[in-house]
Structures are given as structure tokens and as C-alpha cells.
Image (cartoon, rainbow, N blue to C red):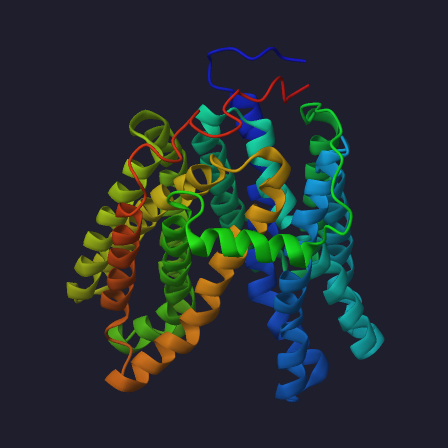
């Protein structure tokens, strides 16, 4: 075991960041290929296609709170969260390996592979978020989340290129093998700090825990928590606006072929790669709240500039810069939020944080669609995103200065020797 020192725990941040690589490996491939695969298997039965594609959201709503609460109970009993994380990785790897062949078994095969794949992904979401805080000392959590974001963006670029070069089946097979390697590294190298078992009240369940956590956030029991949730929701709403509507906006505004819009998405991913690690370092240096506000200001400025450019070639560097700015609040929001949460409740509060972001994504598409109908075109996209970013900046202003900063929380003693 490595002893805790004053040096940044780069090994811990690198290994924990593999969780980001997992989401970078799986997410883009699923977005790029699963809708097409389901359509090819089911034909033009659009309602049925919609039902299959909704399984991810259903499993997210069911498994994220349940797994977060289950990981808290496991921690209270001295077992830790990693077994749940590893189980999710193994399920997801199986789903990735089987999914390209699932249409051979008809609708039952597609449904089984979908449940297996998305079940694994959503099972590990909230326990993994809690594990970051459990394993990395408070002072360096922004570096850890920076590593997660960096590896997620880099993985997305690599595996999208693999999909284009070698086709879906090969890319999914490589992705499944990569997820297995991540599980192996986690199993061998990560060690959760040992804590004495705590007697949990009988009848504790995911719904009750989540409801209590949600009420605490709404009522403002923990200073600044409500503002952080609102900022996270608006941050995800901004991101969802870009990922959903940019292609339609670019084709209409710049008159480019649909295939060329991928350049914009690649620029955004590259901005995330270059911005993530500096965002973590800046959060450690000037504080998480200040880093978030700096990022929101830079992002708003870039988005307003994007609204004014007239050519696609001028938009590309601004998209990359906007994404680099986006990493500052993305990397520092979770460490600021989780600082005030005791270890025994991190799973369920991490679930609430993730559901808050999911809500931002869920309301973003219908809200933006309504606004585009009102304007009659997609032209205002970047101004709308700038508006959401400005509101997020205002929300962060309501976080009291000093709240959520490193080593100020209830469990402020740094985690002991997390990496073997």
C-alpha cells in the first residue's frame, strides 16, 4: 500500500479516471450504432423502436438510485462499493460483446442485450461517483474528476474512429475487451479505505433515501447544495443542447453537407481533452467555486462569439475553446458538491446529483424544440446555450464562498492509502 503524502496522488487519479474511459468507450458507440441497429432489426416500426431506445432511461431511473443506496449500505457494513462497480463493468462488457449479434435472435435478443448493456452501465454510475470521493483525498478530487473527463473525451474520439475504420462489430468487440481490462485494473489496484461496520436502521431503501436526500437539497439543509444542483442541471442542459441540435443548426446556418457536421463534434471532444486536466489543476489552485465561475464566463463568451461567426472554419476553434471552458464546471462541480456529504451517504447523494443532470438533459430537448418552433429556425442555438450558461453562473454565485472547498467537509481527513 502507498502511504499518503503531500504529493498529488497521480496514480490514484489515473486509475480512477479509467471510469471516464469506460463512458468514453461505450457512450459514443451506443449513440452512433445502436439506433441504426435497432431500426435495421425492427424495420420502420417507429413506436417499437422508441420503446427499445427508452430502456436506457428507464434503467437509469431505476438503477442509479437503487445502486447508490445499496453502495451506502455495503459501505456501512464494511464491504465497500467496488463490488457493485465491478459487477456493472462485467455486465456492460457482456452487453457490448453480444449486442452486434443480438438481431439474429429477433426482438427478444435485442431486448436482452439492451437490458444487459444499459443495466451494467447504469448499475455502476452512482457507486463509481461515490468511489471517487472515497479513494481520493479531498484536496485532489478535482484532479481525479479531470482525469475522468479527459479519458472520457479521449476514449470517445478513439472509439468513434475505430467504428468508422473497422465497422460496428469490430469496434464493439474491442470496446468489450477494453471494459474487461478496466474491470481487471480496478479489481487489482483499487483498495477502499477500511471502516468499521455501522448498524443501519431497518427498512432503509433506495426510494426513502433518495426522497430524503432530495428534500434536504430542496430545503437548503446543506449550504449551497441546492445551487450546485441547479448549476449542474443547467450545465447538462447546455451540453444536451449542443449534442442534440448542433447538426441541424450547422447544416441550416452554414450550408454544409450533413457528413461534415462531425467536424464540430470532434472539435468539441478535442476541447474536452485539452481542457479537462488543466480544469482540475485550476480547481486545486484557485478553488472549485472560482474555477466553475471562470469556466462559465469563458464558455458564455465563446458561445456569444459562435453566434456571430459566419463561416464554419471560424466556428471550429471557438467550439473547441467552448468545450475546454465547459470542462471547468464539469470537473469541479462534483468535488464541490460531494465535499459536504459524509461517506455513508455519498452513494445516494451521488445518485441525486446524476439524476439532476439527467433531468437537465431530459427537459432540454423539448424546451429547445419549443423555442426553435417559436423562432422558426435553428439560428438562436448558441445564444440559447449562452443564456443557460449565464443562469448557471448565477446559480454558482449562491454557493457561499468557502463552502465545498477542499478539506472543509464532514469527512475532511484525507482518504488513507487508496491505491495498492
Please state the horizontal and vertical placement of residue 334, each as a whole percent of the image. 46, 42
Asked if residue 412 lies left or right of residue 108, the reply is: left
Q: Quadrant of residue 383?
A: bottom left
Residue 308 at x, y percent in the picture: 15, 64
When asked about the image quadrant of residue 287, the answer is top left
Left or right: where does residue 124 sit relative to residue 142? right
The image position of residue 188, as x and y in percent, is 74, 27
Residue 319 vertical position relative to residue 135 in the rendered view, above or below: below
Q: Is residue 305 above or below residue 80?
A: below
Q: Residue at x 57, y 42 (%)?
A: 129
Residue 121 visible in image: yes
- Residue at horizontal 78%, vertical 47%? 202
Closest to the observer: 377 or 351? 351
Q: In terms of depth relative to the viewer, which is nearer, 154 or 146?
A: 146
| Total numbered circles | 0
The quarter in which the C terminus is drawn is: top right
Q: Residue at x 48, y 58 (%)?
A: 356
Horizontally, is 181 left or right of 299 in the view? Answer: right
Query: Vertically, is 413 above or below 155?
Result: above
Q: Nearer the viewer, residue 408 or 190?
A: 408
Is residue 163 at least partly visible in the picture?
Answer: no
- The quarter in which the N terminus is drawn is top right
Q: Position of residue 276 (x, y in %)?
A: 40, 39
Amino acid at each position: 500500500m502507498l502511504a499518503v503524502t503531500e504529493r498529488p496522488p497521480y496514480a490514484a487519479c489515473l486509475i480512477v479516471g479509467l471510469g471516464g474511459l469506460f463512458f468514453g468507450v461505450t457512450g459514443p458507440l451506443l449513440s452512433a450504432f445502436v439506433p441504426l441497429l435497432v431500426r435495421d432489426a425492427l424495420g420502420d416500426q417507429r413506436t417499437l423502436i422508441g420503446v427499445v431506445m427508452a430502456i436506457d432511461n428507464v434503467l437509469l431511473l431505476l438503477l442509479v438510485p437503487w445502486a447508490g443506496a445499496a453502495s451506502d449500505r455495503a459501505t456501512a457494513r464494511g464491504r465497500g462499493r467496488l463490488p457493485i462497480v465491478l459487477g456493472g463493468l462485467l455486465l456492460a462488457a457482456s452487453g457490448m460483446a453480444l449486442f452486434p449479434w443480438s438481431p439474429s435472435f429477433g426482438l427478444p435478443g435485442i431486448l436482452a442485450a439492451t437490458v444487459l448493456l444499459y443495466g451494467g452501465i447504469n448499475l455502476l454510475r452512482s457507486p463509481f461517483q461515490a468511489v471517487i470521493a472515497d479513494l481520493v483525498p479531498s484536496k485532489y478530487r478535482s484532479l481525479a474528476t479531470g482525469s475522468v473527463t479527459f479519458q472520457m473525451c479521449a476514449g470517445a474520439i478513439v472509439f468513434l474512429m475505430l467504428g468508422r475504420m473497422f465497422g460496428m462489430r469490430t469496434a464493439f468487440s474491442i470496446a468489450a475487451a477494453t471494459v474487461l481490462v478496466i474491470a481487471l485494473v480496478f479489481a487489482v489496484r483499487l483498495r477502499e479505505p477500511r471502516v468499521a461496520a455501522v448498524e443501519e436502521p431497518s427498512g432503509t431503501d433506495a426510494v426513502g433515501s433518495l426522497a430524503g436526500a432530495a428534500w434536504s437539497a430542496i430545503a437548503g439543509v446543506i449550504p449551497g447544495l441546492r445551487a450546485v444542483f441547479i448549476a449542474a442541471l443547467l450545465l447538462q442542459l447546455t451540453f444536451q443542447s449542443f449534442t442534440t441540435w448542433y447538426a441541424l443548426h450547422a447544416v441550416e446556418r452554414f450550408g454544409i453537407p450533413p457528413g461534415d457536421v462531425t467536424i464540430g463534434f470532434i472539435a468539441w471532444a478535442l476541447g474536452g481533452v485539452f481542457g479537462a486536466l488543466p480544469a482540475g489543476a485550476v480547481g486545486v489552485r484557485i478553488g472549485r467555486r472560482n474555477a466553475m465561475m471562470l469556466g462559465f464566463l469563458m464558455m458564455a463568451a465563446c458561445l456569444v462569439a459562435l453566434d456571430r461567426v459566419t463561416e464554419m472554419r471560424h466556428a471550429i476553434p471557438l467550439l473547441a475553446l467552448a468545450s475546454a471552458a465547459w470542462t471547468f464546471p464539469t470537473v469541479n462541480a462534483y468535488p464541490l458538491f460531494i465535499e459536504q456529504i459524509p461517506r455513508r451517504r455519498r452513494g445516494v447523494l451521488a445518485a441525486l446529483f446524476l439524476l439532476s443532470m439527467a433531468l437537465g438533459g431530459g427537459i432540454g430537448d423539448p424546451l429547445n424544440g419549443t423555442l426553435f418552433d417559436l423562432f422558426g429556425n435553428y439560428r438562436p442555438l448558441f445564444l440559447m446555450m449562452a443564456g443557460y450558461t449565464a443562469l448557471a453562473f448565477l446559480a454558482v454565485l449562491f454557493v457561499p464562498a468557502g463552502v465545498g472547498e477542499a478539506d472543509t467537509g464532514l469527512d475532511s481527513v484525507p482518504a488513507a492509502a487508496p491505491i495498492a
